[in-house]
Amino acid sequence: MARTETKPRPRTKPAAPRESDETGREYLRTMLLQRRFEERCAEAYALGKVGGFCHLYIGQEAVSTGIMSVLRDDDYVITTYRDHGQALARGVPARGVMAELFGRVDGCAHGKGGSMHIFDRNVNFLGGHGIVGGHIPLATGVAFAIKYRGGDQVIACSLGEAAVNIGGFHEALNIAQLWKLPAIYIIENNRYGMGTAVERAAAGANLYDRAAAYSMACAHVDGQDVYAVRAAMQEAVERGRTESLPTLLEIRTYRYMGHSMSDAASGTYRSKAELEQDLKRDPIELHKRILLERKQITEAEIAALDEEMKKVVQDAWDFADQSPEPPPAALFEDILVDSHT
Amino acid sequence: MTVMTYRDALGAALREEMQRDDRVFLMGEEVGVYQGAYKVSKGLLQEFGEMRVVDTPIAELGFSGVGVGAAMVGLRPVIEFMTWNFALLALDQVVNSAAKMLYMSGGQFPMPIVFRGPNGAALQLSAQHSQAWESWLAHIPGLKVVTPSTPYDAKGLLKSAIRDDNPVVVLEGEMLYNTKGEVPDEDYLVPIGVADLKREGEHCSIITNGKMTLIALQAAEQLAKDGINCDVVDLRTVRPIDVAAITTSVKKTNRAVVLEEGWEICGIGAQVVDYIQRDCFDWLDAPVIRVHQADAPMPYAKNLERIAKPDAAKTVAAVRKVLYLD
């Protein structure tokens, strides 16, 4: 569910057995927002308006959309440095994300974090984190805090498939199952950790099998199908809320761009043919087809929705462009809090 | 006042702060059922239960990250490392997560967390278990780092650390846990960032921190027998450093010896000497001398270990040298 400046994100309701017309359109809206937003990110990067590392999510939008569609406002979300899509899907305002990318004072982290560190306390978006695997134990900690307080929230923690090979992943999952914590670890398997194919980095055919080492519930799912992601998330969230137990999901997806803005989409570590093959399963196109087949939307409505999202993104761009740079004094602000209890 | 050990002073600080604020919990290896590897947490599991005194697997990176995550959503974790040598496995969480969270979130996520445990060499534990990590941690903006030397400071600084809304590193002295001292019966705090003049003298300033404060006091005692009186400035906090306490002392004595437990290169002493040359250049009557661990990994053999460690004799020699007595 996308929260934009033009349309506030509705509170998530319990999933209906059959998806309504409105819900299907809402998923399309959210995915289109992410896609159009990141296309403009690439443009802004080329123009020098965005700097540093910038990792695009294009191709994976059904994953974030499916995840967020199941969460309540009081649940928590934490993710990696490939965080724009997750942030927008969770409801971080597009203006704040774009201004952050532009390094401006009205960015959601006032220009201190940049592309890799989108944070928004208002929607319990606990950040994009820049060290592979480093945020996975944090998710376990948030789940610990939920249990400590006796709440029924969950935390959704996205990670790239390359992170399953790092120690923190295993330490975090072991603790979560051992202590029965409501965390959902979501491997977004886009098949490449930077330029290293998953089969060149991970022993074993199925990443979700790693849950077996901790007797943790797990599932794998087609990440290009928003309904499939949603269904897997519903089970995991239910397990978290009612049994206070974690889940490991492996969501198989694909990124259409390079690892970051500094590498080509194909040519070195993957072939153009492979990329073109996967482009045929573009999650947005797949979803449009489903909605059209079900007569839940018309071509004209799709075009109108797309135009609307382009306008939201243009508004975010204009907002970011007009926002001032942080004042020099900001350099020394927010290093420490000036208070204690 | 009650005379108690450094260990019990830390335990009392934990107990009182956990009684005061139910968001505070203790997490680490052997803190609960085993009653603490060094018995700092003795009795806490029985008093507060296993949700607040949490035994962890041996997974420093994991449980430190659990602390950081819990702090992000408003709890106030105290993370115990069995020793800071093991905390190297968790430095990603201390440095990249805890110290940066407030800044990179633009002020949205304060990090009220304490990382504590024994630091520095004990006796014949050899290379991997005998290291003083002050300078590594003090290097990082976004952290506060305290190094209490007495039971009084240990209790007061740990209580301040737990109440602080920032990540605070508490480096305890492994060899200090059994030392005794007077501790007030009433609630008190020792402010972070304020040094303490542990002994007054007019001839030379010995500037030090943590366990080395005891060495400095021994040296000062020996020197006093020869009529040489030293200021012993216990920094207590190595980030932020109380620069005024250093310069006030050096401007009075005009001479300084800087004593630390760790290695020479990029040590805390190097920073202290920089403050002295910057602010006290015209007051100095002699070059400043540093006393520190020999530039070698800590050896096991008793005789070699003795040579490697800074001690009172080396400190006495340094003071005599800056006074041009030898």
Image: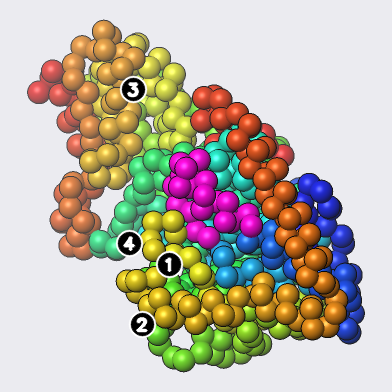
Left or right, A2 with respect to B227, comes to: right
Q: Are marks 4 and 1 in contact (CB under 8 Å)?
A: no
Type of amino acid under label 4:
His
Depicted A58 relative to depicted B321: above or below: below
Name the front one of labels 1 and 3.
1
Q: Which residues are magenta?
A: A36-56
Q: Which mark is residue A200?
A: 2
Quickly name the residue at label 3.
B275
Q: Secondary structure at mark 4?
A: helix
Type of amino acid under label 1:
Ala
Depicted B13 relative to depicted A132: above or below: above
Q: Secondary structure at mark 3?
A: helix
Please tell me how crowded label 1 is: few (under 14), some (14-19), or many (20+) other residues with Cα within 10 Å. Answer: some
Quickly name the residue at label 4.
B129
Q: Which mark is residue A313?
A: none
Where residue A329 appears, as percent x and y from the top left, is 54, 24
In 3D space, how far apart are the residues under numbered discs 3 and 2 (Cα atoms)? Answer: 52 Å
Type of amino acid under label 3:
Tyr
Identity of the residue drawn at 32% across and 61% down: B129
Is the N terminus of chain A in the top left, top right, bottom left or bottom right quadrant? bottom right
Can the viewer see residue A300? yes
* Chain of residue at mark 2: A
Residues at discs 1 and 2 both on one chain: yes
Please tell me which of labels 1 and 2 falls first in the chain. Answer: 2
Name the front one of labels 4 and 2.
2
Left or right, A276 with respect to B106, comes to: left
Identity of the residue drawn at 59% across and 70% down: A60
Name the front one of labels 4 and 3.
3
Please tell me how crowded label 3 is: few (under 14), some (14-19), or many (20+) other residues with Cα within 10 Å. Answer: some
Identity of the residue drawn at 59% across and 80% down: A281
